[in-house]
Image (cartoon, rainbow, N blue to C red):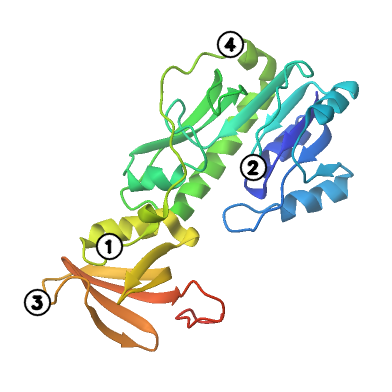
Amino acid sequence: MRFAITLTDRFKVLLDIALQAGWQPLKIFTSPLDGKIHDNRQVIEQAARLGIPVQLSPMTEADLAALAAQGCEALLLGSYDWKVPDWRPYLAHAVNFHPSPLPEARGPFPLVRAILEQRSQWGVSCHVVEPRFDSGALLDQQLFALNPDETLATLEWKCQLALEQLGRRVIADFASLWQQARPQGAGSYWPRWSDAERTLNLRGPLDVSLRQLRAFGDINCLAEANGVGFVVHRAHGWLEPHAFKPGTLVRSVDLSMLFAVADGFLVISEWSVQAPSAVSGRRPF
C-alpha cells in the first residue's frame, strides 16, 4: 500500500512497521520542534537514508492532491502540530494514532493530565481522521494499567509499547479494521495544561506536589518563593510533622532549597529562574 505519514521520533515505530509490512512510503510530514516534548531527528535521518521526501511546513490540499496523483492510498497520522486539510476528496483512507483510551481524553498530549487525575488505566487508539480532533470512528485500541506512582517518563514508554502492538494489528489488517470502525460516542476533550496546573503550591500537601512533579517530568513544574518565580527541574520530598509555617524556605545549601510544606518537606535540588543569564541551581552536567 502506498502511504504518507506524519511523524515525530516517538511515533517512528509506525513507519518501521509499515515498511516491514511492505507498504511503500511516498512522503513524511513533520514540523520544526524544540525537542522538549517531541523530537524528529531520528525520523529525518531515516528518511534521508531511505530517500523518502520530508516536508517541514504545514500540509496543504495541494500536497494531498500531489499524493493522490502518486497513487497514495492512506495517510497515517502519528504526531503533527498542524490541522490536516480535508483528505476525503483525495485519499481513500486517513487514520490517526492518539495516546489516550478514546473517546476519553481527546486533545493535545493528554498524558500529563492522566497522571494528575490519577487514572488507573490508559491506552493508545487508532481512529478515522475527521474535521473535529480525535473524534473519528475507532479502528482499534490498546489498553494498559497505570501505577499509583506513574511518571511522565514511564507513561510515555508504556504508550510506546502499546503503540507498537496497536500499529502491528492495524497495519496487518488495515482494510478489515477500516470497514469495521465503530463510532466513538460522547467522550471528553482535554485542553493543554495551564501554567497554574504546573505550579507547585509550597504551602499545600506533599502528595499533590509530588504528583505534579511526576506528571510534568522534563516539561518541568513552576514555583514561587519570596516573590520570585522559578522553574523546578528536580525535587524530592518526605512526610514529617514540623512546626514551620507551610511555604517557609527552611534552608538552602549549595543552591539546593528545602521548603516546609503542609505535611512534610520538599527539597528542590535543581531549578532555574526564567530570565536570561539568571541564577540557576541546576548543575551543568
Q: Is residue 231 shown left or right of residue 139?
A: left
Residue 74 picture location, percent across and down: 75, 23
| Residue that appears at 39% across and 89% down | 254
Q: Earlier in the sequence, mark 4 or mark 3?
A: 4
Q: Quadrant of residue 167?
A: top right
Q: Which mark is residue 33?
A: none
Q: Relative to 83, say whether 94 is above or below.
A: above
| Residue that appears at 82% across and 44% down | 54
Q: Relative to 254, say whether 2 is above or below.
A: above
Of badges 4 and 3, nearer the viewer stands 3
Q: Quadrant of residue 269?
A: bottom left
Q: Which mark is residue 81?
A: 2
Measure how far apart labels 4 and 2 are at the Cα level.
29 Å
Q: Earlier in the sequence, mark 2 or mark 3?
A: 2
Q: Which of marks 3 and 1 is nearer the N terminus?
A: 1
Q: Which of marks 1 and 4 is nearer the N terminus?
A: 4
Residue 98 picture location, percent across and down: 55, 34
Q: Which of marks 4 and 2 is nearer the N terminus?
A: 2
In terms of depth relative to the viewer, which is nearer, 258 or 236? 258
Q: Residue furthest top?
A: 179
Residue 8 picture location, percent across and down: 67, 46
Q: Relative to 134, say whether 191 is above or below.
A: below
**Residue that label 1 marks:** 201
